[in-house]
Image: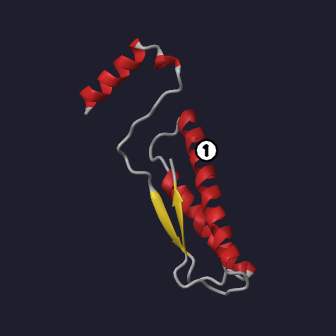
Amino acid sequence: MKTALLSLLAAAALTGTASAAPVVITTEAVPTRHVRTADLNLASEAGRSVAVRRISAAAEDVCDVAGDRSLKTALSVRRCYSGALKGGLAQLSDLIAARPGAATAATATVSVGGR
């Protein structure tokens, strides 16, 4: 696998495409957390507030980098958190819009992914 990747990178450098935007190939899974909302009354402010707190906590969890406290990592974590939170809140908004006035959704979850 590494040999094939190195060959691909060498070929790209020789053909002049190395100046293009870098391509990152990874086999690591994107960390994801599923946030349950079925137990919440999303028609109420209190229920929505709890859902937002759960989504925020999930975003923090998937974007955490233990041990590395460099500025570069801190900025990366912040971008990850912002993206994960934005995605989770968009799903929550879609979930609420799909069931206007409904107190709960029987199988409602929001997926929050990072990195």
Among the 4 quarters of the image, the one containing residue 3:
top left
Residue 53: image quadrant is bottom right
Q: Secondary structure at mark 1?
A: helix
Left or right relative to 44: residue 57: left
What x and y, as percent, mark residue 13?
A: 41, 15
Q: Position of residue 56 (x, y in %)?
A: 61, 62
From the viewer's perspective, is residue 19 above or below residue 41? above
What count of labels does the image hold?
A: 1
- Examine the rendered structure and indicate whether residue 90 appears above or below residue 95: above
Task: Identify the residue under disc 1.
Answer: 79
Residue drawn at (56%, 58%), measured in percent from left and top?
A: 59
The residue that appears at 53% across and 38% down in the rendered structure is 73
Name the amino acid, label 1: Arg
Q: What is the x, y in percent for residue 63?
A: 51, 51
Q: Nearer the viewer, residue 80 or 71?
A: 80
- The structure residue drawn at horizontal position 66% and vertical position 62%, both measured from the top left corner, is 90
Position of the N terminus by quadrant: top left
Residue 103 to residue 112: above or below: below
